[in-house]
Amino acid sequence: NEHQVSIGETTFTGREELHDANGFIDYGAMMYVTLQRARTAREAIRIMTGLANDFGYKSTGESFSVADKDEAWILEFIGKGKYGKGGVWVAARVPDGYIAAHANQARIRQIDWNDRENWMWSDDVVAFARERGWFEGPKEEFSFVDAYNPLDPASLLLCEGRVWSVFRRAAPSQNFSADYWRCVEGAEPYPLFVKPDQKVSIQDMIAFVRDHFHDSPYYTGEGIASGPFNNPYRWRPIYFTLEDDEETRYAWERTISQPQTGFSFIAQARNWLPDPIGGIFWYGVDDTYSNAYMPLYVGMQEPPRSLVTGNIVDFDWDSAFWVFNLVANYAYGLYNLIIEDIQKVQLEVEDRSHALTAAVDIAAYELYKVDPGMMYAY
């Protein structure tokens, strides 16, 4: 929003008995209404949880990324289903110099009850779990994951593998083992936060969300997991069964890059610049591996026409959604012959964007000091 507050989410679903279709506000509305009101990440967390408590919550469990120009937080929230209004939740601030990752499952385990500067929680997050019989023992041993989103092999294979993929590339020196997401008994869960080997740039963030488990034994562009022409995707539902066994579910590894992606974004917030200039929303449509991220400044007065035209049914050459889908769909048929051509253009247009934003920052800031109205128009 105009204060450089950003919110993203992944759905972890959680315990089915805590879903209430009769609630009033869903996770999307929580995010949109909060972005209309919040000036900081901490304020956003209070607003989001307050909305759910005041009006009732109708979605499943969610992990939210909530950030501003000074802080980033992970908020994990689930409703109370038929057992009450609102929800139970916990939020952890990402320590300075560290990164977090989450991918469709809850990741917050132990809570530091003595650190109210870097942790927030609902008053009944432990008591509610006790009432329902999901937790026994001292408060210090309480785990949000174990109480509200108990993990199974499917969630490790499909979700925690993507967390591992980010952590292993951000901090290769820490040699994160694949054992946990490969369901090796006794393997330690990955930490909530990790310190990357070097400072993370926008280009690094873009690289993190372009992933098929490259340079690992689990690369989906080779072997039995790959499709024709080293296509890293299998055209099947997430789960499938075999003809002689309708009860056992199987799944291919789920990479971060996916053909089902509608849009993705990287929110950049910079506290040394005025908000209209400091905030850049790097936005892309369709598969992250073949898209191109475009920088949209918070201070822009209107979006590009390519992002506001077209619909889901009729092809439109003026619509970014349709053009990026078309390019990706061409690639899927002859992947290893076409993707390199796409990546060449991808690199050209993104390098141009990174170079130009450095110049736009300077020009916009000079205009801001003289005439903010001219800056907005620029």
Image (cartoon, rainbow, N blue to C red):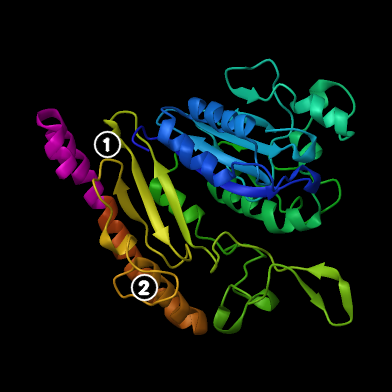
Marks 1 and 2 in Cβ contact (< 8 Å): no
| Stretch in magenta | 355-378
Say few, some or many: other residues with alpha carbon within 10 Å of mark 2 (under 14 / 14 to 19 / 20 or more).
some
- For badge 2, the amino acid type reads Val
Residue 196 seen in the figure:
no
Coordinates of residue 176 in the picture (x, y in percent)? 67, 47
State the image quarter where residue 344 is shown: bottom left
Q: Mark 2 points at which residue?
A: 323
Question: Number of numbered discs present?
Answer: 2
Q: In this view, does 252 lie to the left or right of 335?
A: right
Which residue is pictured at 69% across the width and 48% down the height? 21
Q: Name the residue under label 1.
A: 276
Secondary structure predominantly adopted by residues drawn in magenta: helix
Looking at the picture, tell me which residue is in the foreground, 139 or 50.
50
Coordinates of residue 39 in the picture (x, y in percent)? 41, 27
Q: Is mark 1 on a helix, strand or loop?
A: helix
Which residue is pictured at 68% across the width and 15% down the height? 114
Which residue is pictured at 77% across the width and 58% down the height? 154
Q: Earlier in the sequence, mark 1 or mark 2?
A: 1
Q: In this view, does 191 lie to the left or right of 311?
A: right
Q: How far apart are marks 1 and 2 (CA)?
A: 29 Å
